[in-house]
Amino acid sequence: ASPFPLTIPINQQKSNIAIMIMITNESTHSTFAVEQALKQPLHVAAAPRRSVCFDEDSNEYFDNTLRAAEDCKDTWYNKEDYQQFRSDIRERIQAALQEQAESESNPNQVFYKTIRKMYFCTRNIGYVLEDASQLLNAKKLQQLRQMYANEAQMDMIGMEYHVVAAIKQDVRQQREAIQDVVYDIQQENRQGLFGSATEFQQELQESCLNYTQACGLFSQLLALAQQEA
């Protein structure tokens, strides 16, 4: 589960609904992600607004000789279906946030607390780490195995970044920070401070890793927890 907004084409098949849930709850169209990625830091003058468009004249159409268009309506989601999915996900996230604020005795509190602990465990790593399982001791492994212990918690798969307010806020801050650092490195490159394109690319890679590694490790931990469920 990544935290950056992505979209799925409107004709995504029903079998892939789990993927849609994980990545579309905050994204509504393809230009959103691009505009956010190009957002300038607050301390500099705003750059011209950029967007992405598609050349519709270059589209190619292929007739389905095996099924009629009327038959496809029963096996493909439409625009209204996707709007309903987004609405349901927003309601579920809001309910989870409200649940944490209202009752400490709720059994799902253990789930939320475990998610929070696992995420900030990855955030505290100050070195390059590729295998998140190296972060697990016996106690953390046991907590991981109990994360998705019931159906309600299984329904949260793909929304872990959004159902805990502290994680959601931290991810937002990390996203803004990585935009700033990329902008600064690009400015240094324009000033000729890098000896080669390879040096520039390596600086980008290493600097961005400081902000992206935690999410990658956290995703690994979530996958391990789901595997144990």
Image (tube, grey):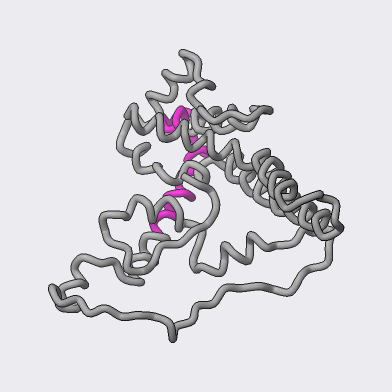
Question: Percent from the top left, x then y, of residue 17?
Answer: 32, 55
Extreme-front residue of the structure: 196
Left or right: residue 199 versus residue 24 is right
Q: Which quadrant of the view contains residue 63?
A: bottom left
Circle count: 0
Question: Percent from the top left, x then y, of residue 77?
Answer: 29, 66
Extreme-top residue of the structure: 138
Extreme-bottom residue of the structure: 57
Name the one closer to the observer, 159 or 65. 65
Q: Which quadrant of the view contains residue 53?
A: bottom right
User: Which secondary structure class fits the magenta region best?
Assistant: helix
Query: What residue do we see at 66% from left, 27% from top?
Result: 127
Q: Is residue 73 a member of the stretch shown in magenta?
A: no
Query: What residue do we see at 71% from left, 42% from top?
Result: 207
| Depicted 3 relative to depicted 144: above or below | below
| Depicted 1 relative to depicted 130: above or below | below
Query: What residue do we see at 43% from left, 31% from top?
Result: 106
**From where the camera sits, is residue 173 visible?**
yes
Q: Which quadrant of the view contains residue 170?
A: top right
Name the one closer to the observer, 114 or 105. 114
Name the one closer to the observer, 17 or 100. 17
Question: Percent from the top left, x then y, of residue 107?
Answer: 41, 29
Q: Which residues are magenta?
A: 87-111
**From where the camera sits, is residue 98 visible?**
no
| Depicted 96 relative to depicted 137: above or below | below
Query: What residue do we see at 76% from left, 70% from top?
Result: 47
Q: Quadrant of the C terminus?
A: top left
Question: Percent from the top left, x then y, of residue 65?
Answer: 15, 77
Q: Is residue 88 a member of the stretch shown in magenta?
A: yes
